[in-house]
Image (spheres, rainbow, N blue to C red):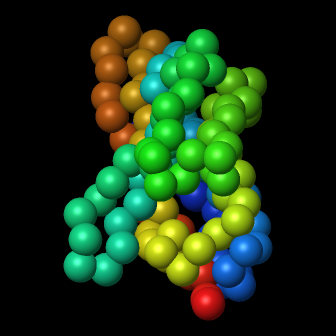
């Protein structure tokens, strides 16, 4: 089985920084698109940032210039560096990855989520 395990969430004051990590484990041949989503209470889950296997990136307008997504293919890990955090960034952050198995099949996986809380 493949697992995505997030870490790095927590409580931070407005203007502060956090770095989220998401490590994939299991019998993985290759990881294609990796992404971070978030879901605030009472709201739909939304895309925050994504990065391709060639390290092409896309960001939600609300986080451009403040968040940076990166990946370490050797470690099957994706990161989200969050600077200039605002109270409206408070949410559960989820890692997502498109994974290819050695069998050649693909599957999309979600992590369990990590809470980020920004106080004003």
Residue at figure coordinates x 50%, y 32% from the top left: 58
Q: Farthest residue to the bottom: give it.
A: 120
In this rendering, would 23 be left or right of 75?
left
Q: Position of residue 96 (x, y in %)?
A: 43, 43
Q: Residue at x 61, y 89 (%)?
A: 119
User: Image height check: is 120 above or below 39?
Assistant: below
**In the figure, is residue 68 to the left or right of 106?**
right
**Image position, residue 102 (x, y; %):** 45, 13
Q: Position of residue 7 (x, y in %)?
A: 64, 62
User: Looking at this view, is 102 or 39 the one in front?
Assistant: 39
Residue 43 locus on image (x, y percent): 25, 71
User: Which of the pair 62/40 is nearer the observer?
Assistant: 62
Name the outermost residue toward the top. 104
Q: Residue at x 52, y 22 (%)?
A: 52
Q: How many marks?
A: 0
Quarter-of-image position of residue 39: bottom left
Between 31 and 80, the residue placed more toward the observer is 80
Q: Quadrant of the C terminus?
A: bottom right
- Examine the rendering and report whether any part of residue 111 can be seen: no
| Residue 90 in sight from this viewpoint | yes
Q: Quadrant of residue 69?
A: top right
Which quarter of the image is occupied by the N terminus?
Answer: top left
Question: Does 2 sit left or right of 117 as displayed?
Answer: left
Which residue appears at 36% of the width and 73% of the height? Answer: 40
């Amino acid at each position: 089985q493949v697992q995505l395990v997030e870490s790095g969430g927590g409580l931070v004051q407005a203007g502060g920084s956090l770095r989220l990590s998401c490590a994939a484990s299991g019998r993985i041949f290759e990881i294609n698109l990796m992404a971070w989503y978030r879901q605030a209470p009472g709201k739909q889950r939304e895309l925050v940032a994504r990065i391709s296997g060639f390290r092409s990136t896309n960001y939600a307008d609300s986080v451009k210039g403040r968040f940076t997504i990166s990946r370490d293919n050797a470690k099957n890990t994706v990161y989200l560096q969050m600077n200039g955090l605002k109270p409206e960034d408070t949410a559960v952050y989820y890692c997502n990855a498109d994974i290819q198995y050695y069998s050649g099949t693909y599957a999309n996986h979600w992590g369990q989520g990590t809470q980020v809380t920004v106080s004003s």
